[in-house]
Every structure is written in structure tokens, then in C-alpha cells.
Amino acid sequence: MVLLNRRLQSVEGVSLDYVVLNGLGYLTYSISLILLYFNEKVRNQYAIRHTLTTMGQLNYPLVRFNDVAYGVHGVFIILVTLYQIYCCGYTRGYKQHVSRLTKLIMFMILPGGIGFGIYAQKLNSAGKANYQLVDVAMLLGNVKVVMSTAKYIPQILHNHRRRSTKGFSMRSVQLDMSGGTLAMCQLFMDGYIRNDLQGVWNNPVKLALSAVSLVPS
């Protein structure tokens, strides 16, 4: 999409709601993956919660570094796209703007996620196990699933109003499809290698994202 925008010197084919919702999803997903991959506290909370009591086996999240790189890369691409939209002087439609609904969603999710994280941390510090940081990580991952599903709606409406898909990169849809297929394969392979196929179902976020990426394709 970035290269297509540059080649056309225009962002008319892209719904701004699509870009913002996609960016919000990548941001929350990246935070979730960073917590599950780098934060030992979160990893231990996950492992304890998913311990096989009969075998005494600690099962850690089926998250790899390439998953983290995927999330961070997505955030970077969205930032570049926003730079093209607002700073490069590319052609935009005069009615092309972020809708009030998308702004409302953004301003509900970001403060809500931060507030829930602080609340969970305080409960955990006080020895109350109602919510833990691992719950925050899983919640942020679920936000990505919702955003990945919802983001196509404004883009479809934008294409319908323009009666055209010119300016929207169809290759990105094809890459989503292939990426979703490979991500699902990797998840099952990781579960098999670690002798933890249950971990596949304990990672509903990645499983759902892989499935969602195949639907619009």
C-alpha cells in the first residue's frame, strides 16, 4: 500500500477509517506480543494458568520473535501510511476523513486498555488474583481480532462509494491470505514440536487472526 500510494501520489483509494482501525489493531497486538514474549512475569502467569497438572508440565505461550516483528512491522507501516496521508501532500478526496465512530472507538480503547492494565497491576501487587497482566495481554490481542474484522467494513463502503478499487492495494489482501495460512501452520507446528497442541487452542488470538485474514481474501 505504501509503494502504491507513492506511485500514484494519491491516497484517494484508501479509507482513513481502515488505516486507523488497522493501526489500532497492530498497536494493541504488538503490546500483547511484547508482553507474552519478553515479560517473564506475564509468561509465568500464562504457564501457571495452563499447567498440565497430571504431567507437571509448564506450557509457555506459543509466541515467537517473528510474531513480535510482525506486529511492530505493522505499526511501522501504518505510521508511514499516516505520514503519506497527512504530510506528503498526496491527493485526497475532499470528503476523505476519519469518521466520528472510528474516533470514538480509538478514544475508548486506548485509555480503557491503559486503565485496565494499571488496575490489573494494582490487584496483582495487592495479592488479589482477580486480574493479572496476562489478562491484559490477552485482552489487547482480542482487540486486534475485532479491529481486523471491522477494518474491512469502511474500506468496502469506500470502494462502493467510489465505484472503484483503484488506489487500494489488492496485493496486501493476497499477502494477508498467505500470511494467515502460514501463521496457522506455524502455530500448529510449534504446538507439535513443544508437545503442547493444547497451546494452539490456548492462543485463540493468533488462531482467530489467521482465520479472519482468510475471510476477505
Image (cartoon, grey):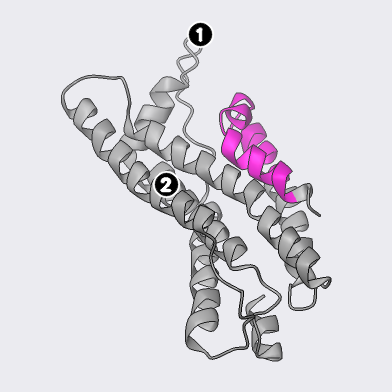
- Position in image of residue 95 (x %, y %): 61, 74
Q: How many numbered circles are shown?
A: 2
Residue in the foreground of this view, choosing between 116 and 127: 116
Q: Is residue 205 magenta?
A: yes
Residue 18 vertical placement versus 183 (above, below): below
- Which residues lie in the magenta part? 184-213
Residue 41 vertical placement versus 154 (above, below): above
- Position in image of residue 1 (x %, y %): 67, 75
> For the residues marked 1 and 2, what is the alpha-carbon distance in whole angstroms?
39 Å
Q: The disc labelled 1 sits on which kind of residue? A: Thr
Q: Give me the residue at 77% from left, 67% from top.
A: 161
State the mark number for residue 109.
2
Earlier residue among tags 1 and 2: 1
Residue in the foreground of this view, choosing between 186 and 90: 90
- Outermost right residue: 163
Q: Quadrant of the C terminus?
A: bottom right
Residue 5 vertical placement versus 130 (above, below): below
Q: Which residue is mark 1?
A: 54
Question: Does any portion of residue 64 appear in the rendered image?
Answer: yes
- Outermost left residue: 126
Q: Categorize mark 2 by other alpha carbons within 10 Å: few (<14), some (14-19), many (20+).
A: some
Residue in the foreground of this view, choosing between 103 and 215: 103
